[in-house]
Image (tube, rainbow, N blue to C red):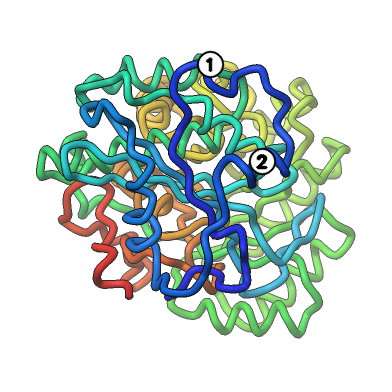
Amino acid sequence: MNLNKKDNLRTLHTPSPVGEGRGEAFSRRNFIRTVGIVGVAGLSGIETVFAASKKGKNSSGKGLQLRFIPYELQLRHTFTIASNSRKTTPDVLTCIEFEGMTGYGEASMPPYLGESIETASKFLSSLNLGQFKDPFQMEDILRYADSVMPGNCAAKAAVDIALHDLVGKIMGQPWYKIWGFDPDDAPNTSFTIGIDNPEVVKQKVTEAAPYKMLKVKLGQKTDREMIETIRSVTNVPICVDVNQGWTDKQMALDMIHWLKEKGVVFVEQPMPKTAIDDMAWLTENSPLPTMGDESVQRLPDVIKAKGVYSGINIKLMKCTGMREAHEMLVLAKSLDLKVMIGCMTETSCAVSAAAQLSPKADWADLDGNLLISNDPYSGMKIVDGKVTLIDQPGIGIGSMQKIF
Ligand SMILES: [Mg+2]
């Protein structure tokens, strides 16, 4: 797999020393000048790119070394949800090096969430991880990264994932083992079917034959048609994601009763995240579990979800990464909330990181790598529809050498 060879933004970056560049207005021009443009000739892949970036290594040579490159994910199908439609997803790949070992991370940034290559580059450029000489001080390192700027959750996740991968590799263990999870407990994953016309939906469902559950995007006038179309070609269980698309609670309840008859298992984010009272009423009366996604971003949101939803959808790109996702999982379980582990469209890097948590999830929606056509990593596999964790250290992604 090659990096996007058309993209002259095949860029490399070594973070600035402390203070450098802070407070400067960040423009695209500034970004390109700062990180440089690397010619395509002679580059064969990520390993080469990261290797080349060592030229700019921090002179201390002892602390953590963070690098990143922009990378545009190409989607296999135009992806349509209740609020928008797109063919690509902006992404930034990261790595953290320490004493000859490398951990890999990623920030996937669907535009509607407000992050971009520019914002992630600005955030990552502002970090000085070189001040940390011990990668095991994850609490301090990640608390520092979280404190540098508000927001930037996906960019923070890119640091968090790379650090977890690095530390897992140093320990020689995958994170599901470090956390004490049994990989046999990992659930089936759903495969997402975006909103589309009936013929395309049937094609997507046919492609999804290996999966034991389908996740169907609803929230438009064609909701019943979408479900009927899918039911005309398969009887596998369905979960639906409305992406805040229903605004009337009685209509939502009627739809959920109808969906239950159609073999739907749960309903994700049926109403706007601000409709808290209506959502609590809906959950109380719903014959199916309701799951909060857009409503539940970070740890404090888990407590707010109790009594409003039946459960929560944890995504690394929303919650700043594996550390906080693990805290959210533990807290949600203690509150008797259902948990699903979800993802954005992203590479096998972030999907494999999220999969480390999946043995303790009720449901998994870890198909983001399967929805793109230019995944530069290998990692967690779906075998017979089930999340299948690999007994490899860190987040369990394959060696870069195997990719190229
Ligand atoms: Mg969702």
Q: Which of marks 1 and 2 is in front?
A: 2
Q: Can residue 88 be seen in this view?
A: yes
Secondary structure, mark 2, is helix
Gap between marks 1 and 2 measured at Cα = 28 Å
Q: Name the residue under label 1.
A: 300
* Quadrant of the frame with the C terminus: bottom left
Q: Which of marks 1 and 2 is nearer the N terminus?
A: 2
Q: Mark 2 points at which residue?
A: 118
Instruction: State the residue in front, 382 or 89.
Output: 89
- For the residue with label 2, is its CB less than 8 Å from the closest atom of ligand 1? no
Whether residues under marks 1 and 2 lie with C-beta atoms below 8 angstroms apart, the answer is: no
User: At x 77% / y 41%, what residue is drawn?
Assistant: 244
- Residue 368 is situated, as x and y percent measured from the top left of the image, at 51, 59
Q: Can residue 268 be seen in this view?
A: no
- Amino acid type, callout 2: Glu
- Residue 264 is situated, as x and y percent measured from the top left of the image, at 60, 58
Secondary structure, mark 1, is helix
User: At x 80% / y 65%, what residue is drawn?
Assistant: 224
**The image quarter in which residue 334 lies:** top left
Left or right: 361 in relation to 394: right
Callout 2 crowding tier (Cα within 10 Å): few <14, some 14–19, many ≥20 = some
- Amino acid type, callout 1: Pro
Dot label at residue 260: none
Depicted 142 relative to depicted 357: above or below: above
User: At x 75% / y 66%, what residue is drawn?
Assistant: 195
